Image (spheres, rainbow, N blue to C red):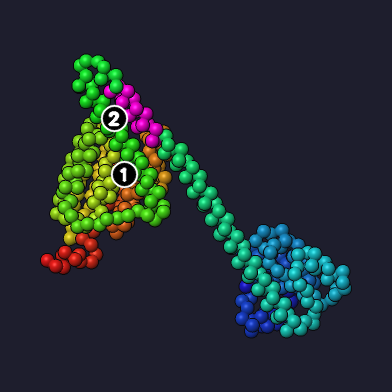
């Protein structure tokens, strides 16, 4: 939009006509003060300023414009009937203007200058926008880099804990080999070592999954197979690592499920592990399932520490951890993100409901069947 500023309405009308006939959108102001107010409110690509005006003259307006950050780059064309001496013209340029036209003006020359400066202004604002976008991009990359560095330090800390514990148990096993009676102690330490090694295995698998997702190399092996076996395995694995917890199962499951079964098992296990990790006194976790014509829904319900409602939308983001669980609980903030990627691949949906101190429910739904008929089904 072009802003034209002149104290004479007849001049404004004439200018407006020329510009509008050449498809420019035009706004007008009858004084320098009014022009400055308008500049603060609207955005203009070019300003045509009459030099001789009562109150603020055109040069003063231009000088004030140079001090307004959103206006300082708007090109200005000065219009003047008198004062066409060299000094005066120079003052026009020094006060921040870009061009100068003396009256009586030639409409063709005016249009030529308007078109050139208008184009320049548009290019400038495009450049500014590109610069702003680039700065935003650099900022977000820096942030991602910082998060990755933080993650590396958290991950190495996480890996070290089970490793140190497993090492300690191996030393105890070594010692108990030379003392009697040993079989009971040996069994206990071997079991604990095994659990710590399993935790280590899960942590390393999580990091590998994350790096595969980042590289777009997470592979899925979709099969149409028995889901009850998978569920049994999940409960067994969970019980092995957390024998102190009881899982209460309820709800039907489909006989067969089209999925990458180990990966769906991983999602359920991760939700169960979180339910155990963020639990308080209760050692009971509910695992509910429901089935409708198209989908299987799984809910993991705990009575643990809960999550403030404003944090719920960010739970499945990479590296996100609720601040209150930062110091008290160990974690890398990646397992729910990996879960979400796995569920998305299965064209499913997921979410969480929770209340601080009132426990949490993590759930997801995935289609039971593929969206196209399988070869074996078609044959049957
Ligand atoms: P982490 O390794 O930190 O547990 P996750 O991706 O599994 O990472 O979970 C992200 C965050 O969500 C956790 O840090 C925790 O703050 C919160 N969270 C996940 N599950 C639960 C739960 N069952 N109860 C309370 N908070 C949870």
Q: Are marks 2 and 1 in contact (CB under 8 Å)?
A: no
Give the extent of the magenta segment. Answer: 158-173
Can residue 291 be seen by looking at this rendering? no
| Quarter residue 195 falls in | top left
Q: Is residue 167 above or below residue 142?
A: above
Q: Earlier in the sequence, mark 2 or mark 1?
A: 2
Q: Is residue 202 left or right of residue 238?
A: right
Which residue does the image show at 50% across and 47% down from the upper left? 145
Q: Is residue 242 above or below residue 50?
A: above
Can residue 260 be seen by looking at this rendering? yes
Q: Secondary structure at mark 1?
A: strand
Asked if residue 163 is among those painted magenta in the image, a careful observer would answer: yes
* Residue to which mark 1 is pinned: 354
| Circle 2 crowding by C-alpha within 10 Å: few under 14, some 14–19, many from 20 | many
Q: Is residue 364 left or right of residue 83?
A: left
* Residue to which mark 2 is pinned: 193
Q: Secondary structure at mark 2?
A: helix
Observer-side mark, 2 or 1, equals: 2
Q: Is residue 39 left or right of residue 80?
A: left
Spatial separation of the CA atoms under disc 2 and disc 1: 34 Å
Tell me where residue 341 appears, x and y as whole percent.
Answer: 34, 53
* Closer-to-camera residue (72/233): 233
């Amino acid at each position: 939009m072009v802003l034209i500023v002149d104290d004479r309405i007849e001049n404004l009308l004439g200018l407006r006509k020329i510009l509008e006939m050449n498809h420019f959108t035009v706004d007008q102001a009858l004084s320098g003060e009014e022009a400055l107010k308008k500049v603060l409110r609207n955005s203009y690509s070019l300003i045509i300023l009459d030099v001789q005006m009562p109150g603020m003259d055109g040069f003063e307006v231009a000088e004030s414009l140079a001090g307004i950050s959103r206006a300082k780059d708007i090109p200005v064309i000065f219009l003047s009937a008198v004062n066409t001496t060299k000094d005066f013209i120079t003052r026009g340029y020094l006060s921040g203007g870009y061009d100068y036209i003396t009256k009586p003006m030639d409409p063709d020359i005016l249009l030529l200058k308007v078109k050139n400066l208008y184009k320049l202004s548009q290019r400038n604002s495009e450049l500014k926008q590109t610069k702003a976008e680039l700065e935003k991009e650099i900022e977000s990359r820096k942030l991602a880099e910082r998060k990755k560095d933080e993650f590396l330090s958290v991950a190495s800390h996480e890996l070290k804990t089970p490793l140190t514990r497993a090492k300690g148990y191996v030393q105890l096993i070594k010692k108990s080999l030379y003392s009697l009676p040993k079989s009971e102690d040996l069994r206990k330490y071997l079991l604990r070592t095994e659990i710590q090694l399993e935790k280590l295995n899960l942590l390393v698998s999580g990091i590998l999954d994350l790096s595969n997702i980042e590289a777009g190399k997470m592979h899925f092996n979709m099969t149409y197979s028995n889901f009850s076996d998978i569920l049994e395995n999940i409960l067994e694995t969970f019980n092995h690592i957390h024998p102190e917890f009881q899982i209460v199962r309820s709800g039907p499951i489909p006989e067969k499920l089209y999925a990458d079964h180990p990966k769906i098992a991983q999602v359920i296990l991760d939700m169960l592990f979180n339910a155990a990790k963020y639990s308080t006194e209760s050692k009971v976790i509910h695992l509910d399932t429901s089935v409708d014509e198209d989908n299987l829904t799984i809910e993991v319900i705990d009575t643990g520490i809960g999550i403030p409602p404003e944090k719920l939308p960010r739970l499945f983001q990479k590296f996100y951890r609720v601040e209150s669980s930062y110091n008290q609980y160990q974690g890398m903030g990646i397992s729910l993100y990996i879960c979400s990627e796995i569920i998305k691949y299965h064209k499913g949906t997921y979410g969480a409901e929770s209340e601080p101190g009132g426990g949490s429910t993590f759930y997801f739904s995935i289609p039971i069947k593929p969206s196209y008929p399988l070869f074996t089904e078609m044959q049957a």
